[in-house]
Amino acid sequence: STYSNLMKLIEKEVQGVNTIYMTTQFGDISGVHFKVGATKVGFTSFHRPVNLTERPVDVAGFLEQNGMQDHGEKICLGYAMTYRDFAGGTLGLAYVGTVCSKYSPTSTKQRSSHSGIVTYLNHGHAVPTSSSYLTLAHEIGHNFGSPHDETDECKGGADGQFIMWYSATSGNQPNNRKFSPCSIGIMSKKLHVDSGMCPSDTIPRSHKSISAFDEPICGNGIREGDEVCDC
């Protein structure tokens, strides 16, 4: 079904992101990984659990709409995954340095700054699933505080550009699936400052999980571990 295919896509995306983050050493923090805490799916204007418009909107406006949602108390990052063709070939957008921020219901905008969006449509063509997770990893990198790799110091050279390069990469070169030393340094500082804000602060630092969920999660739409079905 369409729903089950969407859940498989989300699961595959997170698995791809985890292959990058779990193998990256952020100072003395290692094993950073993610799990899906909850999912909401909207197919049409008549079935849209979240208030994300179907009207034409630019990528910044779409992120702002997602940033107005309450993602839940234990959710460190809330992402909207869509199939929209944004101007300029933009594949994603996220707020910078906001991982594990809290929902602020009194704000007129950006109530949930721990937000991001990614799209799977680019210039009229579907983004290949073999590399689409790199966009999600890139946007999460922004949530973790990293800017783009735009300086000579952060360029990847013959092995290709790193994940936080300012434009999408093919994903075929060695550095395309790695963070640059510049990004790692900035993200490490952010994780050390904000690790106590995340629900998983009881996990040993050497196995830090920014997801807070290490067991199968009933109701997230994904069948995990020993679950017979997702209740």
Image (spheres, grey):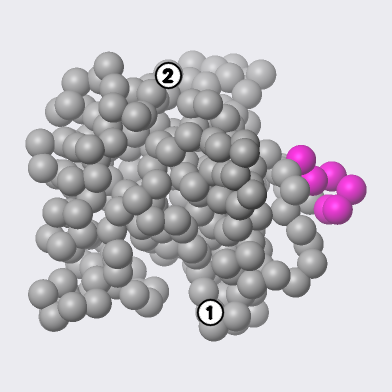
Query: Identity of the amino acid at label 2?
Result: Glu
Q: Looking at this view, is 106 or 25 the one in front?
A: 106
Q: Where does residue 85 sit, x and y in percent of width and height?
A: 64, 74
Q: Relative to 23, is 37 above or below?
A: above
Q: Mark 1 points at which residue?
A: 89
Rounded to the nearest whole Å, what is the CA distance between mark 1 and mark 2?
Answer: 37 Å
Q: Is residue 45 magenta?
A: yes
Q: Where does residue 66 sit, x and y in percent of width and height?
A: 62, 51
Q: Relative to 6, is 171 above or below?
A: below
Q: In which quarter of the image is residue 112?
A: top right
Q: Name the residue under label 2.
A: 215
Query: Identity of the amino acid at label 1?
Result: Gly
Q: Where does residue 83 sit, x and y in percent of width and height?
A: 65, 63
Q: In which quarter of the image is residue 111?
A: top right
Q: Relative to 111, is 37 above or below?
A: above
The residue lying at 50 percent from left, 53 percent from top is 116
Stretch in magenta:
44-49
**Res. 159 visible in picture:** no
197 on left or right of 185: right
Q: Quadrant of the C terminus?
A: top right
Q: Is residue 140 magenta?
A: no
Q: Which of marks 1 and 2 is nearer the N terminus?
A: 1
Q: Looking at this view, is 207 or 76 the one in front?
A: 76
Q: In which quarter of the image is the N terminus?
A: top right
**Res. 27 visible in picture:** yes
Q: Is mark 1 on a helix, strand or loop?
A: helix
